[in-house]
């Protein structure tokens, strides 16, 4: 993060945010800079990636689903944007420790204990390490004593849009993001690779909420895609993983996606429309009668599945 902070310092922050007389290694200067960079970066990544996915990938017909909430998109954005500043506070504390040199981040490939093979291995190990940690953190957040206080707000979105990707309670959002920040304190990682993986993590988080259920057949039992994660939102106790299905299989929580078996949200919408139990509506504006008819019908449909 010191790379981003140095660029922001040079082009934007000095002298507009703090005076040039402050030393570059001044702790207050670094904390202020990190707070601004973290909040702006999070908002730009969330709104930018979410908008691209919403307008170009997300299947808007899913908004006809009876469990899609009125004004849901706006509610997702509002909740996420109100949570991100709170999530940034403990996150900045970790970034500050990185900037002060307490992590194992390095600048050059030659600084890696194993050179290029070590850099490539660190990318793979980052994915598997964070996937494992998030799985268990996610399961912990589903514990009956924890769930209602921190994780339940994210499960309000039964049929999520890309904007649900960051719509977490602040404690939930920070805990699920914690493994990404812990990794470079435990294992060597190139600074540019770390930034690249940080962007990738945000892209992936948006993608598993984008309603695009397509997965290459060879990977559908390995990769935890949008179809898998949508079933987590719908059925609660399955598919806790982030990238892979490995830990769900080990933990006994794997569920083959209903969308890949012809029993997913789109199939439900088609069935209800064919039965005349779903009135025309989109963007959470289903007519009252249609919403009631469809809600009762979907419970029957899920029992049949």
Image (cartoon, rainbow, N blue to C red):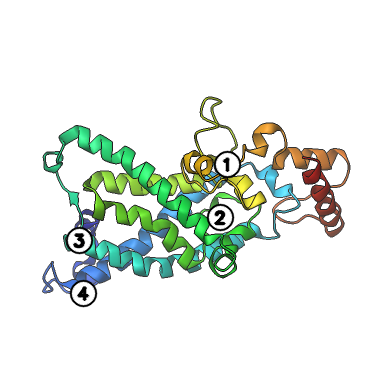
Image point (15%, 35%), residue name: 115
Label 3, secondary structure: give it. helix
Label of residue 99 in the image: 3
- Dot 4 alpha-carbon crowd within 10 angstroms: few under 14, some 14 to 19, many 20 or more: few
- Residue 88 in the image: above or below residue 290: below
Image point (23%, 64%), residue name: 97
- Residue at the disc numbered 1: 254
Name the mark nearer the viewer: 4 or 1. Answer: 1
Label 1, secondary structure: give it. loop
- Residue 136 in the image: above or below residue 152: above
Q: CA distance from mark 3 to mark 4?
A: 12 Å
Tell me, yes or no, whether the two marked residues, 1 and 2, touch with CB atoms within 8 Å. Answer: no
Looking at the picture, how far across and down is residue 193, in whole percent?
A: 27, 43
- Residue at the disc numbered 2: 164
- Residue at the disc numbered 4: 28
Question: Who comes first in sequence, dot 4 or dot 1?
Answer: 4
């Amino acid at each position: 993060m010191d790379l981003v902070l140095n660029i922001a310092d040079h082009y934007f922050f000095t002298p507009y945010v703090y005076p040039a007389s402050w030393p570059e290694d001044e702790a207050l200067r670094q904390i202020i800079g990190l707070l601004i960079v973290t909040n702006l970066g999070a908002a730009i990544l969330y709104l930018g990636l979410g908008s691209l996915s919403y307008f170009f990938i997300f299947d808007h017909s899913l908004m006809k689903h009876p469990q899609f909430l009125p004004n849901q998109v706006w509610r997702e954005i509002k909740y996420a944007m109100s949570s991100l500043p709170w999530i940034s506070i403990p996150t900045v504390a970790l970034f500050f420790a990185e900037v002060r040199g307490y992590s194992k981040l390095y600048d050059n490939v030659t600084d890696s204990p194993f050179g290029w093979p070590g850099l490539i291995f660190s990318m793979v190990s980052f994915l598997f390490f964070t996937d494992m940690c998030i799985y268990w953190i996610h399961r912990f957040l589903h514990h009956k004593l924890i769930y209602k206080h921190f994780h339940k707000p994210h499960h309000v979105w039964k049929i999520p849009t890309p904007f649900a990707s960051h719509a977490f309670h602040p404690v939930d959002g920070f805990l699920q993001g914690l493994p990404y920040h812990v990794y470079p304190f435990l294992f060597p990682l190139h600074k540019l690779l770390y930034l690249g993986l940080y962007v990738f993590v945000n892209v992936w988080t948006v993608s598993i909420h984008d309603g695009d259920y397509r997965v290459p057949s060879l990977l559908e039992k390995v990769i935890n895609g949008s179809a898998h994660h949508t079933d987590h939102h719908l059925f609660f106790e399955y598919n806790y993983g982030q990238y892979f299905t490995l830990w769900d299989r080990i933990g006994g929580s794997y569920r083959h996606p209903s969308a890949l078996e012809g029993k997913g949200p789109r199939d439900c919408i088609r069935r209800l429309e064919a039965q005349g139990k779903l009135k025309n509506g989109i963007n959470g504006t289903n007519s009252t009668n249609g919403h009631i008819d469809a809600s009762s019908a979907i419970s029957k449909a899920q029992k049949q599945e």
